Image (cartoon, coloured by chain):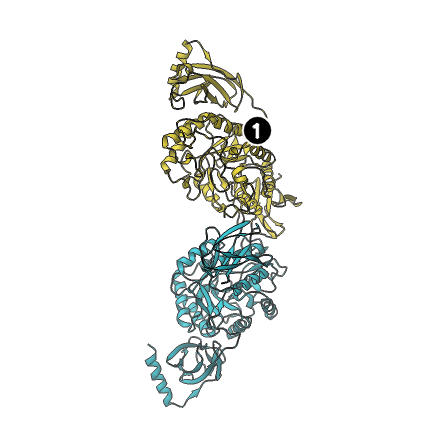
Chain colours: A yellow, B cyan
Amino acid sequence: MQRPVLIALLAVAAMQPRLQAAGPNEVERWDRFEAALLAPVSGNPFTGPGLKADFTFEHRTVTVDGFYDGNGTWRVRFMPDAIGTWTYVTHSDIAALNGKTGQFTCFKPSTANHGPVAVARVTHFAYADGTPYYPIGTTSYAWIHQGDQLEQQTLATLKAAPFNKMRMCIFPKNYDYNKNEPQYYPFPRDAAGNNDFTRFNPDFFAHLEKRILDLQGLGIEADLILFHPYDRWGYSKMPPEADDRYLRYVTARLSSYRNVWWSMANEYDLMKTKTMADWDRYFRIVQETDPSSHLRSIHNSGPMYDHSKAWVTHVSVQSSDLEKAVDWLATYRKPVVYDEMKYEGNIPKRWGNISAQEMTRRFWLATVSGAYAGHGETFLDPNDVLWWGKGGVLKGESPARISFLRKILEEGPGGLNVTPDRYYLNAGIEGQYYLYYFDINSPAEYEFNLPAGGKYHADIIDPWNMTVTSVSATLEGKTRLALPGKPNLAVRLRRIN
Amino acid sequence: MQRPVLIALLAVAAMQPRLQAAGPNEVERWDRFEAALLAPVSGNPFTGPGLKADFTFEHRTVTVDGFYDGNGTWRVRFMPDAIGTWTYVTHSDIAALNGKTGQFTCFKPSTANHGPVAVARVTHFAYADGTPYYPIGTTSYAWIHQGDQLEQQTLATLKAAPFNKMRMCIFPKNYDYNKNEPQYYPFPRDAAGNNDFTRFNPDFFAHLEKRILDLQGLGIEADLILFHPYDRWGYSKMPPEADDRYLRYVTARLSSYRNVWWSMANEYDLMKTKTMADWDRYFRIVQETDPSSHLRSIHNSGPMYDHSKAWVTHVSVQSSDLEKAVDWLATYRKPVVYDEMKYEGNIPKRWGNISAQEMTRRFWLATVSGAYAGHGETFLDPNDVLWWGKGGVLKGESPARISFLRKILEEGPGGLNVTPDRYYLNAGIEGQYYLYYFDINSPAEYEFNLPAGGKYHADIIDPWNMTVTSVSATLEGKTRLALPGKPNLAVRLRRIN
């Protein structure tokens, strides 16, 4: 559909003197190209004529929205996904922004850059370069709204933690233990706190972007929550046109960050002023305006959104019912991530005080159900700095165990799906690899029934004490294995022939 | 309906010389009166003309079936439920059994005799004398089929254990770890093992009765399982007329034992040759032929029987889903007993190796859901003596904790129903008593919201370590209580004004 239009525009551009936009000449694959363009401002530049750019690689052209960044500066950003020469041309009804062209070379990514994460093998994830990605998430809803000191502490904590995904709100948060004002507001506001939803605050977004890059530097995906109900500033009840403009502004600014994921909401069903049609529309706007097709999900409190809708890439779910994973995987044929399954901690709220043992157990249950899990932490703090809301330090005992699990996953073949067993949950790859978790069961022996032809090495894994005990005997066909007769143990079987 | 007939019969009796049947002159209330009658045997006395007796107390008459007990002896048994003078008269088409009359005095029961258990306060139980009964059951399916030495050991174990109900099969059991032949068979059989289902083996039943009395002496209800699927002798696939005759014989023999409960089946749904109409018929036969109306239930493997049917006195359920108790209580308005919620142990089967901690947890979850729980134990044994099948000794760590819970229940007011709380499960009596169990939750504080006017004493209970820690402060209205911030704790609130 765009090709004919594009050709016409390029033809026009070719007839004019080439107006180079300010951008780099070289960009790492899956890194960010950004061009800045200046123009005189008249009226409200956030609602006035916009800016688009077509980025062309060989026979493929991608159209990208630009955005106004204040101070008479418009920007267009793009994440090139192919190595080689890219050219681009801008389009705008503002003359000074129109017909700017340029080119850059996209080169081989650096070692730590595996590209954006996407769905792979139906119910799993991988980076764009094919490296498996096992989401081991945590949640700190408002960590970017706490000021530099605490935010730096949060980053230092994350550096030593096992997490490779952070659920975080774009908007600030108003809730128990979360009553402070943010450093930045997304929209300009007057002294009385009235928002001008027709404009954005570029400083707010620059700060957000800085934190996204901080996470990227730590190998952490930023699972950005676009809307949430815990609000006293008005962001949860904006008029529809403001919602839509906000989504387009966000995708224009952030789609080029390879570690961005889109979560339409935290607890969408608690936002009583929004209808299901609103949520569908948000999904479609994000899907249509993000040229890099980052992952898209929506998170529930009670009733689940219909995750079979085409624009949902994976199931992000609040649930403590780990047994449902198998059904959801079969129903949706999409990855299932238990992004909220209660928090390790000690606050009075029933969702905020499970033990480290229980959190560890749930990570394992999700794993052997072919799904993924997310961590969060809520310990009472004299200054109300709870990890789940504000970040800071981790006080719990589950992260070490989650790190242990992550290591086991990374040692494995990836893409573990539930494999049939008479009694116990396990995920694996038939004939190759099996990871059992016995949960509350504590058999003193178990007869594994392995496919003919394979010889397997067994390890008995203690997820809490973080030990792996190698079994000397080799397993083959029906083999009875002596087990410690204690609950919460795991067994890993790896084919050796 | 029976009164006119009775009067006629008594009138006939009065005209004849009184033929006293052999029975005691005095019977304790809720104990067993038994009269033995001799007659010449012709044909099959188990299928020939039967024997009934009418027991009359003041203006009330109860008709009771007698039974043939071998050696030319018929017996009629009866559990008198009222103190005073009872008279009786027998009826039979066998002349020597007909028109026998007698009387006995029913006197005050001894201290340990509280009468049979019945449903009380809708979803709870009480003995006939009003003493609350909190079922704390265990299961040993085939313990009476193990020979005297092991049976005596089982009884010795029970004497020191916390259990006041035993789920046990009448028929022997054939299953993994349960392969031995029984000492007694319920029906005569030939050398090839063919049963004569038209006759009973009185020795079998005498032995069963002995064990029922042994349990009674220990204060344990005998929850008798009438049918079960784990069979190699043919008892699970008898013709309908044999099933019915068996039920009538059993009720005739056993209804006078005050500690008898009737369970139509263990895992009724696994008995594929029986239809739902069969189960309904069994219930009706038992209901109609048991003059003492002992408790009646049926136990499932998968799908549940329709417990709303009028002949079901309480819900006996196999389930690990303790959360369903609240729904079932609301649906059926009958007591709910989780008679099988997996077993403490270490066998490979998934239902046979939960930890003592998990068993303890489930007892507490059932309790604070307004329901009741049952224990069982399956530890591997070199001689295949697993408590759940054969009895013997208890090896697990849950019985001590179950004993601790029983003590707490017995200290309480009884009849605990779920009371509303924002977050946590608790059962109690509004304005008087509350028992909270926090399960996986480990709040470091909690604000209780108690009804106005009451002052409450709080205890923090550790169900695993079996400690009760008294809180010095008194609770009133909305009171925040500091808690240890550990999982699996309970709190008891008792009104003190």
Q: Quadrant of the N terminus of chain A?
A: top left
Q: Nearer the viewer, residue B54 or A160?
A: A160
Number of numbered labels in the structure image: 1
Q: Position of residue A334 (x, y in %)?
A: 46, 37
- Relative to residue A404, is residue B41 drawn left or right? left
- Relative to residue A189, is residue A348 drawn left or right? right
Disc 1, SS: helix
Q: Position of residue B10 (x, y in %)?
A: 36, 85
Q: Residue furthest front?
A: A191
Picture residue at 37% right of the left edge, 88% below the top: B14
Amino acid at dot 1: Gly
Q: Nearer the viewer, residue B456 or B109?
A: B456
Q: Position of residue B403 (x, y in %)?
A: 57, 63
Which image quadrant is residue B334 in? bottom left
Q: Quadrant of the C terminus of chain A?
A: top right
Q: Residue furthest right?
A: A472
In the depicted structure, whether residue A310 falls above or below residue B407: above
Q: Is residue B338 visible?
A: no
Which image quadrant is residue B405 in? bottom right
Q: Which residue bears the numbered disc 1?
A: A217
Q: Position of residue A96 (x, y in %)?
A: 42, 14
Q: Is residue B285 visible?
A: yes
For the residue carrying disc 1, how many other residues have a C-alpha within 10 Å: few (<14), some (14-19), or many (20+)? some
Subunit of label 1: A
